[in-house]
């Protein structure tokens, strides 16, 4: 009798403590190269040609319109691993937080509707059914976006509070599984901003 009650109340407590946060970005370029750049890693220009993409910072939103064309020089058969980590600036030092996501086969789930990046980004790409077969390992693929506003919102955060300066570090690596080799070119980008509670 006591245990279910305890479980129930702790669940309710968690719901009460869950909070939504947003990340306010102040750099109009949005993406910066990684500070502790892994050897061989390139910034956003190593992944996409953004000449046809408009990124406009508008208060707490990033307005996105236009096209991004993949330029990463890897093979369409390569497997891509992806990770995104949230770090916090603490007395001048970037420290890891509990927030991170990773995929050992990003191309398998780039357009999967249950993924974080689908909600924020890939659901706005036109003609998803065709794009599913291409992914970012097909050099020259043009991702045409229906214009959208990107809200950098983190929902239902529990057990911790976010306050101050943070950055998201996104890393992509490509592997030729047949020969068991990692491609020399990888991608690392950072998005830096301030987190505050909504
Ligand atoms: C994006 O690509 C489409 C199709 O190629 C083209 O019609 C459109 O003008 C491009 N958008 C921009 C902003 O260049």
Image (cartoon, rainbow, N blue to C red):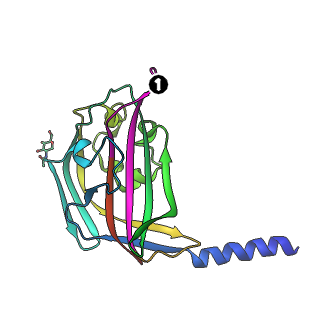
Image quadrant for the C terminus? Answer: bottom left
Q: Indicate the position of residue 82 as horizontal and vertical percent values.
A: 43, 44
Determine whether, in the image, residue 91 is placed left or right of residue 18: left
The residue lying at 38 percent from left, 25 percent from top is 77
Q: Is residue 59 magenta?
A: no
Residue 102 vertical position relative to residue 154 in the rendered view, above or below: above
Which span of residues is magenta-colored? 165-187
Determine whether, in the image, residue 65 is placed left or right of residue 190: left
What secondary structure predominates along the stretch shown in magenta? strand
Determine whether, in the image, residue 123 is placed left or right of residue 31: right
For disc 1, the marked residue is 180
Q: Indicate the position of residue 189 as horizontal and vertical percent values.
A: 31, 52
Q: Nearer the viewer, residue 64 or 43?
A: 43
The residue lying at 44 percent from left, 49 percent from top is 83
Quadrant position of residue 119: bottom left
The residue lying at 32 percent from left, 65 percent from top is 192
Q: Indicate the position of residue 34 as horizontal and vertical percent values.
A: 32, 54
Residue 145 vertical position relative to residue 139 in the rendered view, above or below: below
Determine whether, in the image, residue 115 is placed left or right of residue 139: right
């Amino acid at each position: 009798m006591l245990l279910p009650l305890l479980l129930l109340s702790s669940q309710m407590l968690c719901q009460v403590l869950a909070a939504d946060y947003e990340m306010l970005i102040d750099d109009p370029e949005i993406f910066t190269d990684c500070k502790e750049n892994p050897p061989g890693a390139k910034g956003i220009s190593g992944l996409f040609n953004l000449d046809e993409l408009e990124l406009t910072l508008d208060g707490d939103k990033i307005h996105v319109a236009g096209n991004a064309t993949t330029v990463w020089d890897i093979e369409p058969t390569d497997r891509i691993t992806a990770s995104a980590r949230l770090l916090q600036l603490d007395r001048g030092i970037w420290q890891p937080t509990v927030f991170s996501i990773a995929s050992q086969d990003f191309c398998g789930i780039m357009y999967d509707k249950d993924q974080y990046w689908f909600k924020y980004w890939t659901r706005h790409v036109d003609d998803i059914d065709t794009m599913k077969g291409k992914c970012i390992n097909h050099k020259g693929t043009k991702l045409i976006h229906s214009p959208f506003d990107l809200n950098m919102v983190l929902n239902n955060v529990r057990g911790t509070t976010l306050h101050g300066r943070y950055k998201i570090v996104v890393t992509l690596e490509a592997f030729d599984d047949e020969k068991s080799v990692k491609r020399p070119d990888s991608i690392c980008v950072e998005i830096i901003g301030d987190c505050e509670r909504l």
